[in-house]
Amino acid sequence: MIRTLSCHCGKIRLETTAELGEVNECNCTSCAKLGFIGWYVDRKQVRLATSRQGISTYIWRFADEGAHFCPQCGATMFRTGPNSYFALNARCIDGVDIHTLNKRRPDNLHNIPSGDVPPLDHDAEDSVPPS
Protein backbone atom coordinates (compact mmCIF):
# COMPACT_ATOMS: atom_id res chain seq x y z
CA MET A 1 0.00 0.00 0.00
CA ILE A 2 1.30 3.44 -0.87
CA ARG A 3 0.69 6.11 1.77
CA THR A 4 1.00 9.80 1.03
CA LEU A 5 2.15 12.60 3.27
CA SER A 6 1.77 16.31 2.68
CA CYS A 7 2.49 19.59 4.41
CA HIS A 8 -0.33 21.94 5.36
CA CYS A 9 -0.22 23.98 2.15
CA GLY A 10 0.40 20.97 -0.12
CA LYS A 11 3.67 22.27 -1.58
CA ILE A 12 5.62 19.23 -0.27
CA ARG A 13 4.34 15.70 -0.87
CA LEU A 14 5.93 12.36 -0.07
CA GLU A 15 4.95 8.77 -0.84
CA THR A 16 5.98 5.66 1.08
CA THR A 17 5.44 1.92 0.89
CA ALA A 18 6.41 1.46 4.57
CA GLU A 19 4.03 -0.35 6.91
CA LEU A 20 2.37 1.98 9.37
CA GLY A 21 3.20 0.54 12.79
CA GLU A 22 4.22 2.10 16.06
CA VAL A 23 5.16 5.78 16.03
CA ASN A 24 7.33 7.69 18.48
CA GLU A 25 5.84 10.68 20.30
CA CYS A 26 9.02 12.03 21.85
CA ASN A 27 8.99 14.85 24.39
CA CYS A 28 12.47 16.25 23.67
CA THR A 29 12.54 19.97 23.04
CA SER A 30 12.97 19.55 19.28
CA CYS A 31 10.07 17.11 18.74
CA ALA A 32 7.81 18.95 21.17
CA LYS A 33 8.33 22.36 19.58
CA LEU A 34 8.13 21.05 16.01
CA GLY A 35 5.04 18.92 16.70
CA PHE A 36 6.90 15.90 15.37
CA ILE A 37 5.62 12.34 15.78
CA GLY A 38 8.33 10.05 14.40
CA TRP A 39 7.43 7.22 12.05
CA TYR A 40 10.75 5.44 11.51
CA VAL A 41 11.05 4.03 8.01
CA ASP A 42 13.74 2.91 5.59
CA ARG A 43 14.56 5.96 3.46
CA LYS A 44 14.57 3.67 0.40
CA GLN A 45 10.80 3.26 0.90
CA VAL A 46 10.16 7.00 0.57
CA ARG A 47 9.78 9.00 -2.61
CA LEU A 48 9.62 12.78 -2.83
CA ALA A 49 6.64 13.51 -5.09
CA THR A 50 7.45 17.22 -5.44
CA SER A 51 10.56 19.25 -6.22
CA ARG A 52 13.50 18.85 -3.85
CA GLN A 53 14.16 22.58 -4.18
CA GLY A 54 10.93 23.21 -2.27
CA ILE A 55 12.30 21.80 1.02
CA SER A 56 14.13 23.78 3.69
CA THR A 57 16.29 22.18 6.38
CA TYR A 58 17.08 23.09 9.95
CA ILE A 59 20.44 21.48 10.81
CA TRP A 60 21.74 20.91 14.34
CA ARG A 61 24.82 19.18 15.78
CA PHE A 62 25.95 17.32 12.62
CA ALA A 63 25.73 18.19 8.92
CA ASP A 64 23.69 15.03 8.19
CA GLU A 65 21.19 15.63 11.00
CA GLY A 66 18.22 17.87 10.34
CA ALA A 67 14.52 18.61 10.23
CA HIS A 68 13.22 19.05 6.69
CA PHE A 69 10.22 21.33 6.36
CA CYS A 70 8.08 23.36 3.99
CA PRO A 71 9.30 26.97 3.87
CA GLN A 72 5.81 28.18 2.98
CA CYS A 73 3.66 26.69 5.76
CA GLY A 74 6.40 25.52 8.16
CA ALA A 75 5.27 21.90 8.50
CA THR A 76 8.16 19.55 9.36
CA MET A 77 7.87 16.60 6.98
CA PHE A 78 10.79 14.37 7.97
CA ARG A 79 14.01 14.19 9.95
CA THR A 80 17.36 12.67 9.08
CA GLY A 81 20.44 11.82 11.06
CA PRO A 82 23.54 9.69 11.33
CA ASN A 83 23.49 5.93 10.80
CA SER A 84 20.63 6.00 8.26
CA TYR A 85 18.24 7.65 10.75
CA PHE A 86 15.10 8.61 8.84
CA ALA A 87 11.72 9.49 10.32
CA LEU A 88 8.59 10.79 8.67
CA ASN A 89 6.24 13.05 10.62
CA ALA A 90 3.14 10.94 11.29
CA ARG A 91 1.14 14.17 11.65
CA CYS A 92 1.58 14.66 7.90
CA ILE A 93 0.11 11.29 6.82
CA ASP A 94 -2.89 11.97 4.60
CA GLY A 95 -6.20 10.50 5.76
CA VAL A 96 -4.97 9.15 9.13
CA ASP A 97 -6.29 10.22 12.53
CA ILE A 98 -3.12 10.51 14.64
CA HIS A 99 -5.16 9.82 17.80
CA THR A 100 -5.71 6.25 16.60
CA LEU A 101 -2.01 5.46 16.06
CA ASN A 102 -0.05 3.12 18.31
CA LYS A 103 2.27 5.59 20.06
CA ARG A 104 5.37 4.96 22.10
CA ARG A 105 6.16 7.88 24.42
CA PRO A 106 9.80 7.83 25.54
CA ASP A 107 10.93 10.43 28.07
CA ASN A 108 13.84 11.79 26.04
CA LEU A 109 13.49 15.22 27.62
CA HIS A 110 14.87 13.84 30.89
CA ASN A 111 16.85 10.81 29.68
CA ILE A 112 19.07 12.41 27.04
CA PRO A 113 21.35 15.17 28.35
CA SER A 114 20.61 18.34 26.40
CA GLY A 115 23.37 19.67 24.22
CA ASP A 116 25.52 16.56 24.51
CA VAL A 117 27.15 15.68 21.23
CA PRO A 118 28.50 12.15 20.95
CA PRO A 119 32.23 12.02 20.27
CA LEU A 120 33.41 11.40 16.74
CA ASP A 121 34.64 7.90 16.09
CA HIS A 122 38.42 7.49 15.87
CA ASP A 123 38.50 7.32 12.05
CA ALA A 124 36.49 10.52 11.71
CA GLU A 125 38.80 12.38 14.12
CA ASP A 126 41.81 11.40 12.03
CA SER A 127 40.22 12.91 8.94
CA VAL A 128 39.67 16.36 10.50
CA PRO A 129 42.48 18.77 9.60
CA PRO A 130 44.24 20.38 12.57
CA SER A 131 43.23 23.96 13.33
Image: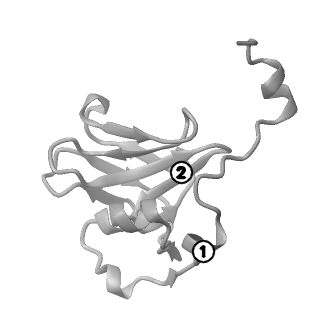
The quadrant of the picture occupied by the C terminus is: top right
Crowding around mark 1 (Cα neighbors within 10 Å: few <14, some 14 to 19, many 20+) is few
Task: Name the residue: 51% across, 46% down.
Answer: 80
Q: Is residue 20 left or right of residue 8?
A: right
Of all residues shown, which one is farthest toward the bottom?
A: 100
Task: Specify the label residue 86 is tagged with.
Answer: 2
**Amino acid type for the residue under numbered disc 2:** Phe
Amino acid type shown at disc 1: His
Q: Quadrant of residue 109?
A: bottom right
| Residue 21 visible to the viewer | no
In the picture, residue 104 is in which quadrant? bottom right
Circle 2 — which element? strand
Along the line of sight, the residue nearer the viewer: 24 or 34 = 34
Question: Considering only vertical position in the picture, is 114 above or below 118?
Answer: below
Q: Specify few, some or many for label 2: CA neighbours under 10 Å numbering under 14, 14-19, or 20 or more.
A: many
Residue 123: x percent and y percent?
A: 85, 27
Q: Residue at x 17, y 44 (%)?
A: 11
Residue at horizontal 26 percent and vertical 66 percent from the top: 94
Residue 112, compared with residue 60, is above or below; it is below
Residue of label 1: 110
Query: Looking at the picture, how far across and down is residue 101, in whole percent?
Result: 41, 82
Counting from the top left corner in percent of width and height, residue 64 is at: 55, 36
